[in-house]
Image: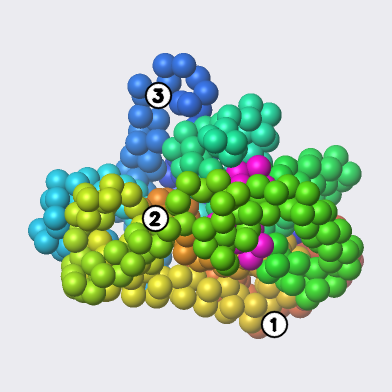
Amino acid sequence: MATLATAINKPAVEEKSRNTLAYNAVLLFTFLYYVRPEDLIPGLNVIPLEKIIGGIAFIALIVTLASGRVKRKLPLELKLLLLLFAQLIISIPFAYWRGGAFATVFEKFSKGVIVAILVTLTIDNFTQLRRLFWVQAASLVIMTMASIVIHHTDQGRLIGALGGIFENPNDLAINISINWPLCLAFLLAARGSSKKAIWTIGILCMLLGVVLTYSRSGLLAMLAAVAISVWKFGIRGKRSYLVVGAMLLGLVGVGVVMVTPHYMARIESIFGGKVQEAGDHGSWEARKELLEESITEAIHHPLFGIGAGNFGAATGTWHVTHNTYTEFAAECGFPALFLLLAILYQSFRNLKRIRSFPAYAGSPEIQLFTDALWASLAAFMVGALFASFEYHLFPYFMVAYTSVLYRLTSESVQNSQPGQQQISARDRVWKRYMGESTYANDKITKRT
């Protein structure tokens, strides 16, 4: 899996990573989390694969850190994440149902903390980060295609072929939307017509998948992802064909909505409340009541909330609020909400600061994935207004991605020598294909 981002790979690219075991375990864990083979292979669900691989990765990381071979400080966003974890732990004694809060904090949220730390500390170079991006993006493409082909539905709405976070139509649509910019980045970075064709089919299937879910929240998240991607990749990136393609797809999308009364009614219900043809069976009114109830609970329990994962039990609704922000405030207090917003802000700040480094200007791939992460984070923030994702893993994957990308680009500046000459684009290509040692020997020969 070649990459142009040699600017942020260490000078001795042939040197193996000292924490390879931990990284490979993280890579496998990411694959298992998104592909979920236990839902496809009979009998595999009795084996807790994710816990086993995650445990191996965590133990390998601890051993590596204890040996002193990896000396890295936790970035600010991870320190804030640890503070958020502490806030959730402190809130347990004040919970409506302490047992449920304990399980939510230590069996769900803790995984996100561990994953973020593992991703941040185990990745040594851009090639490893890109490989992790690829596993996640490819898994979402495969899962979306499988869902369309198998076509399991719930009241006419597409549901995921896999279980877990993809089983609900709204969660499926938002997950597709969050990962769509990464897939577009791989399309733009792809070399060769076959790779470009595969990624093109993939991103089109993802758009179709969101439409087939009839998810209003997923549609809004996808619109945010597409709009930012077109702006960053198409307009700012001066790819006119991407802008034209987006306009054509937009026209097709409007046509589909216009000729599909059910879908049109669901779109209208976003702005007009209950619409008879929307087929939501009163869900709009129910979600409005849940939102109001979550705000009320947050105001009445501002410091520690009513307990992580306790909203349904404490209010008697037995539903989540379908809003990450108000649910976090209601269940874990306003400190938890403010810490989450601070983490997201710091992630955007990482991406903004990356643009000031020479590696960003000199590497098209770093530009692509920086902008893709920006669009993915924005799509998540939009989707989080309509779904409860605070205890899922994928938001903290993205936070860790921004940390790693910022660290690698900043280290490229620190490791660069002031007197080192810049090589031409032709030499960079030559160096990449001929190899480090061959390139260096040839340059010495020319100087003598």
Q: What is the crowding at mark 2: few (fewer than 14 residues within 10 Å), some, or many (at least 20)?
A: some
Judged by its main secondary structure, the magenta piece is helix
Query: SS of the residue at dot 1?
Result: loop
Tag 3 near tag 2, CB within 8 Å: no
State the scheme by which the image is colored: rainbow
Q: Distance between the Cα atoms at labels 1 and 2? A: 65 Å
Verify whether residue 295 appears in magenta.
Answer: no
In what quadrant of the picture does the N terminus appear?
A: top right
Residue assigned mark 2: 286
At a point 40% along the width and 73% down the height, the residue shown is: 341
Q: Amino acid at mark 3?
A: Asn
Which is more toward the observer, 321 or 399?
A: 321
Q: Which mark is residue 45?
A: 3
Q: Position of residue 218 (x, y in %)?
A: 58, 54
In the picture, measured across the screen, residue 122 lies left or right of residue 174, that is: left
Residue drawn at x 68%, y 73% is 360
Mark 3 in CB contact with mark 1 (< 8 angstroms): no
Q: Nearer the viewer, residue 248 or 440?
A: 248
Question: The disc labelled 1 sits on which kind of residue?
Answer: Gly
User: What segment is highlighted magenta in the picture?
Assistant: 211-224
Three-letter amino acid code of the residue under disc 2: Ala
Q: Is residue 56 visible?
A: no
Q: Is residue 293 something that shows in the picture?
A: yes
Rounded to the nearest angstrom, the CA distance separating label 3 from label 2 is 34 Å
Indicate the quadrant where residue 95 lies: bottom left
Label 1 sits on residue: 419
Identify the image quadrant of residue 314. Answer: bottom left
